[in-house]
Image (spheres, grey):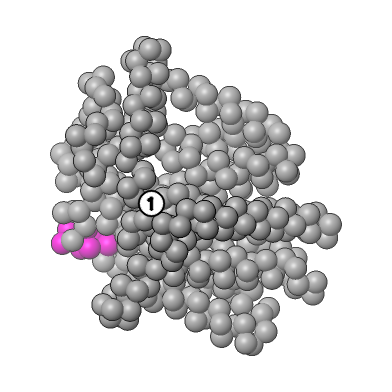
Amino acid sequence: MIRKKNIIIAIVIFLIFLLLFLFKIKNEMTDFEVCYKAGKRILLNENLYRLSDGHEQFKYLPFSAYLFIPFTFFPLTIAKGIWYFIVLITYFLSLYFSYYLISEKRKKAWVLILLTFLILAKFFGRELQLGQVNCLIILLLLLILIKMLENKEFLSSFLWAFTLPIKPYALIFLPYFIIKKRFKIVLYGLLFFVIILFLPSIQYGIKGNFLLLYKWRENLSLTTPFLLGSYDNASIYAFLIKWFGERKTLITFLLILIFSLLIFIMIYIIRLGNKRKIDSPEILESSILFIFIPLLSPLGWYYNYLYSIIGIMILINYFKTFPKTLRYFLIFNFFLIGGTLYEVIGKDLFRIYTQFAIVTINYLIIIAFLIYLRIKSSGPKI
């Protein structure tokens, strides 16, 4: 009976997402269209990076274009549909693996997964709308963590290297691996990455591959500065620009101060986990590093806070650990993250929330709550 009920629920969810694609998403997914075009270009040995593409620039390393070649054998609309469901699958797998990683489960699986999904739904919706690749990277990062905890460092290193050409977000784990003395992951990972970096040489030749890499770097340097203060950018750097304008000296000082503080906090959290001999301290530590990805990236788009998936789930799981006042504050913070939709808070408030990158503050608060869990001497051993 339970299985039949679950099957019905799964079918209903599938139909909802199918209708969403057919009546809305299929006409969008502009970021996927960029990758689809790159897949066609690399098949024809063409230049991937063209300023003439305007806003729709391909900004990933050359190797990543190969990942989209299979989609080019289908018409664009069908290719979009395939990628749409791949994104759905990778995200729901990410929710499951986040649940799997939490060793001390204080709430039922459906509660943790559903609440985490609802809080992050607006980010996920934007991910689907653009046809982005973040869900795939999140899944790979979670698998890296799982395999690292299983001491399968060779596989962890390969997965780590594989994520880098798509988006270099996983570089946030490089100093972490070194501090944790996971030198095999670093060594094998960098070796795999170099191999991946030069694989297009088979098709373009060594000189042609170097030219592609040069074009990639040139493209980033020419197009990135104009996006730093963009409306949707919610990194710490963008946050400071939006609040303090073009005061470069002040912003540089604040960036150095904030980055130094975050590094100090991370080292302290790691040392505290080692001192207390916590089982699998990497889970909470990695959840903070996941949030660092949009915070520290120059172009940390607001929907990139989807990377907080495991951190949000940890806080929901240990919700009753916090004092009553902090619980109310955490609920309010969750509402600001997930409930600040145009349809919910209205045009004016939504514009203020987005324009001033208030989501950045929300996630600094999330990090503070995660730190609280590690520091609290009588708290959970995570």
Residue 223 point in image, percent of width and height: 32, 41
Q: Which one is nearer the viewer's eye here, 68 or 239?
A: 239
Toward which corner of the image does residue 171 lie, by quadrant? top right
Q: Quadrant of the N terminus?
A: bottom left
The answer to whether residue 98 is seen in the rendering is no
* Residue visible at 55% across and 50% down in the picture: 142
Stretch of the chain drawn in magenta: 17-23
Residue 343 in the image: above or below residue 149: below
Quarter the C terminus occupies: bottom right
Q: Is residue 174 above or below residue 273?
A: above
Q: How many marks?
A: 1
* Residue 173 is at least partly visible in this image: yes
Mark 1 is surrounded, within 10 Å at the Cα level, by few (under 14), some (14 to 19) or many (20 or more) other residues, namely: many
Image-based side of 32 in relation to 141, left or right = left
Q: Secondary structure at mark 1?
A: loop
Comparing 301 with 278, the one in front is 301
Which residue is nearer to you in this view: 75 or 130? 130
Looking at the picture, how far across and down is residue 103, in whole percent? 67, 62
The three-letter amino acid code for the residue at tag 1 is Leu
